[in-house]
Image (spheres, rainbow, N blue to C red):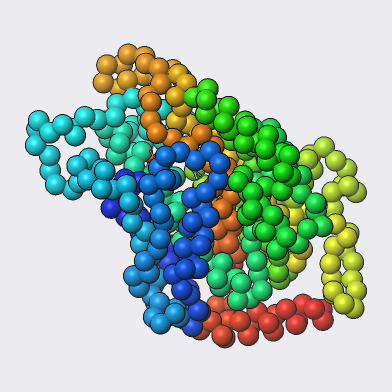
Amino acid sequence: MRYLTAGESHGKQLTTIIEGVPSHLPIVADQINESLIRRQGGHGRGRRMQIEKDLVEITSGVRHGYTLGSPISLVVHNDDFKHWRNIMGDEPLADDAEVRRTISRPRPGHADLNGGLKYGHRDMRNVLERSSARETAARVGAGAVAKILLRELGIEVAGYVREIAGIVSDVDESLSLKERAAISEASPVRTFDEKAANKMMEAIDQAKKEGDSIGGVAEVYVEGMPPGLGSYVQYDRKLDGRIAGSVMSINAFKGVEFGIGFEAARKNGSEVHDEILWSEERGYYRGTNRLGGFEGGMTTGMPIIVKGVMKPIPTLYKPLQSVDIETKEPFQASIERSDSCAVPAASVVMEHIVAFELAKAITEEFPSDYFPRLKRAVDDYRKEVRSF
Ligand SMILES: Cc1cc2nc3c(=O)[nH]c(=O)nc-3n(C[C@H](O)[C@H](O)[C@H](O)COP(=O)(O)O)c2cc1C
Ligand SMILES: C=C(O[C@@H]1CC(C(=O)O)=C[C@@H](OP(=O)(O)O)[C@H]1O)C(=O)O
């Protein structure tokens, strides 16, 4: 499975094309819409999210509620486009057109300057339109299809928030995926501890008041992956590596951890590695899950636990020094509409990005263009490893 996205933040629409989804998988648009709506929420989002109501149109690859095995294309219309029609139009502009006004003031922390240098865009709107995290709506569409495939195989994926601005929300490690999903879904910052959630919201409001922004940590939890997915035999087949790469590709993500992650550097081996146990009822399993479900680039069959670190949003009302590329003069701050914290939304994005990598690994391990056949292969494999 693979996918591509297209679309500018204030352009007409976002498009996703997903290739390699087997036929006869039941899909309806509302399942994808549920994911899209979840991505729009969370305390700290800016005014743009009041304008958009992300709803998908499935434009190919699905007929009467089932995948055809042909490429699936998804379209999400940008409601904000109507306000940007002049600026984002594809007609050549008259020399004196008002909308010729260009963006010449790059924001530190965003893609503006590097993108301008690389693509020769002296109007950096041409960079920000595509570097904007609006694109993550298109990626969530692909992830929602992946989640449907995984669910049919008994694999569930949940994303939530663990930390915002240094405020940590503890999670009771014994909580099941369903419990994690339900509790975080009910929280305005998608987290567990209500006290921490209130503090997080205060920190977000404070940052907003000060014209600043804040980041945090999102976590994705996966139940039901069979052991042995991914591989140790070649670097680019290591599934933890692939997941890490795709999590790092989310806008503003700066780091990834599995299980106890960076804490492993400060512990002895006996406090890090998960002992191997066996029982008639469960087959092989681990006494702990400190490594977060991976060994040797392969799943262990234990829940996958992966964290991603999101830096604070780069667009600030508070002055940060930059240089106008036309005048070469320093300036401070450009006032633009922006989120002040998007970690809750990003936890939904991360959930879907991880789901896509898992579905991709499954379809590589059990290649079939016909979903019922793929499912039978997965069931057989589960039986085989159970009696190993
Ligand atoms: C869900 C989400 C919402 C975001 N919202 C904003 C925003 O409103 N303003 C902004 O400047 N950056 C926002 N970002 C972050 C930028 O898109 C990101 O920092 C930028 O593309 C540069 O890429 P980099 O930070 O990965 O280097 C958001 C990111 C995510 C995941
Ligand atoms: C549109 C979304 O996020 C946007 C991501 C973003 C950025 O620079 O990344 C900037 C903001 O866009 P605008 O400049 O239109 O207010 C966010 O609203 C979205 O998540 O759907």
Q: Quadrant of residue 75?
A: bottom left
Q: Measuring from the top left, give residue 66's x and y in whole percent.
A: 45, 80
Q: Check the image and report above or below for 244 versus 213.
A: below
Q: Residue furthest top?
A: 329
Residue 44 visible to the viewer: yes
Q: How many marks?
A: 0
Q: Quadrant of residue 337?
A: top left
Q: Measuring from the top left, give residue 38's x and y in whole percent.
A: 53, 55
Depth check, front residue: 267 or 329: 329
Residue 294 visible to the viewer: no
Q: Residue at x 36, y 66 (%)?
A: 57
Q: Residue at x 60, y 64 (%)?
A: 358
Depth check, front residue: 96 or 31: 31
Q: Check the image and report above or below for 363 versus 119.
A: below
Q: Measuring from the top left, give residue 231's x and y in whole percent.
A: 66, 64
Q: Viewed as shown, does residue 356 lie left or right of 58?
A: right
Q: Residue at x 56, y 53 (%)?
A: 348
Q: Viewed as shown, does residue 356 lie left or right of 71?
A: right
Depth check, front residue: 258 or 139: 139
Q: Check the image and report above or below for 355 versus 50.
A: below
Q: Residue at x 34, y 70 (%)?
A: 59
Q: Check the image and report above or below for 239 versus 319.
A: below
Ligand 2: image quarter = top left
Q: Viewed as shown, does residue 135 lie left or right of 99?
A: right
Quadrant containing the C terminus in the rendered view: bottom right
